[in-house]
Amino acid sequence: MKHRVIVLGAGYTGAAAAGRLARRLRRDDVAITLVNAAPDFVERVRLHQLAAGQDLRPRPLDEMFAGTGVELRTAKVTGVDADRRTVAVADTAGGVQELEYDTLVYALGSGWNDQGVPGVAEHACEIASRSGALRLRERLAGTAAGQSVVVVGGGLTGLEAAAEIAEARPDLAVALAVRGGLGDDFSDKGRGHLRKVFGSLGITVHEHTAVTGVEAGRVTTADGGAVPAAVTVWATGFAVHPIARATTLKTTGTGQIVVDATMRSVSHPDVYAVGDAAMAMGPGDKPLRMSCASGTPAAWQAADAIAARLTGGKLPKIPIRYFNRCVSLGRREGLIQYVTADDRATGAALTGRLAAVYKELICKGSAWGVANPTLGLPVRRRRIVRESARTGSAVDASA
């Protein structure tokens, strides 16, 4: 029998892992199934552009994985039984099926996090998903000139959303509400550039402002004040998919699967987790942050570790580290903040038009890597040596 690998989720990390496994392992020995709720790959790092009215190139998964040997299943994951090694999925017609695996790659990712703030779910918009970005796009299209848009959250998502909306709709009064100062995690040069660009775009920044409620037409703050908001965009971080927490896998309090340096579950050796779904430690013994910057290398790490364990090869020992944070500030401005290996800002930063071009190249490169999942890697397909994840024993697959 072929060794059955199931990859859950076809975002950046799941798609990268599936493609890399297809390149590393022989089709005669392994069956790779990629399960995703939608038939298309979503460029999540561009959803602020979609929300602001721009059209994104469609990327059907069946075209991306044509000829790779990866089987695509368009279905929603409804459950994982890590002890029985099964996954429950519901297809588009509503039928439910149970899939068995020998190795599971869990890459279901994350969605928006309302942080338990009253009124967010009822009145705010999100851009953590394609459907959310499209709803915000429709909402903005129906917003009259002069009305206010408040983006809540000073992370990269919030910065990019505020700048993109302000550039696309200069007739709106765009504001950004942040708990701390604008660009606290950036260098002096980076913070200075943020202020310059936001000033030129007419964005009002409410610093040291904790939003405690969202209502129709306004957001309320911890100091008892209120900020007018015809549209509220909630960008205060991400929450992981809830399925893992309902399993016997060891997870954190937030539902992330605890993994080792090879992205392997510390409780179930036949399960790997990558991207936002995983709690992995990086340089400085700090958890890797939810980002494409750490998620994609983690997917490569997991795929290479799976291939190594199945073929008797050497485990990857390349540490995952950071190099920079890439921020688009509309279509004409950008900020590339260089960071240490453990993600602390250095004094160096690239700004302006060149930074915008740099960020665009990063986005295109990431999408190209997913759209061409088996290109760019040396062919190292070897006959697998089946590993029993429970006992650590191995049996030659050719026997």
Image (cartoon, grey):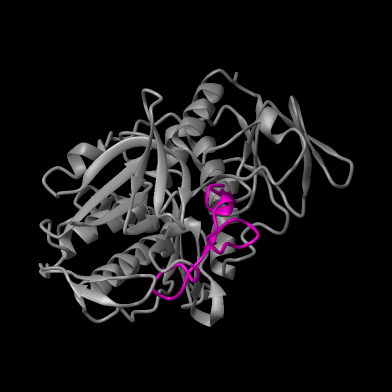
Residue extending farthest to the front is: 399
Q: Using the image as rendered, state which of residue 78 and residue 167 is in the foreground.
A: 78
* Viewer can see residue 70: yes
**What residue sits 66% from the left and 24% below the top?**
147
Q: Quadrant of residue 121?
A: top right
Judge whether residue 244 is colored magenta: yes
Magenta stretch contains residue 377: no
Query: Which of the two residues, 374 or 43, is positioned nearer the viewer here?
Result: 374
- Quadrant for the C terminus, please: bottom left
Is residue 10 visible in the rendered structure shown here? no
Q: Main secondary structure of the magenta part?
A: loop
Q: Position of residue 287 (x, y in %)?
A: 55, 70
Q: Percent from the top left, x then y, of residue 253?
A: 65, 60
Query: Magenta span covers which residues?
Result: 238-267
The x and y percentages for residue 389 are 36, 70
Look at the image and tell me in which quarter the N terminus lies.
bottom left
Q: In this rendering, is residue 176 above or below 1?
A: above
Is 251 positioned to the left or the right of 262 in the image?
right
Residue at 33% over, 49% down: 100
Quadrant location of residue 57? top left
36 horizontally vs 247: left or right: left
Identify the residue at the far right of this view.
224
Q: How many marks?
A: 0
Q: Can you give x and y, in whole percent of width and height, for residue 391 in the image?
A: 37, 75
- The foreground one among 262 and 158 is 262
Foreground residue among 303 and 151: 303
Residue visible at 49% across and 75% down in the picture:
282
Q: Judge from the rendering whether residue 18 lies leftward or rightward of residue 265; answer left or right.
A: left
Give the answer, above or below, for where 55 lies relative to 26.
above
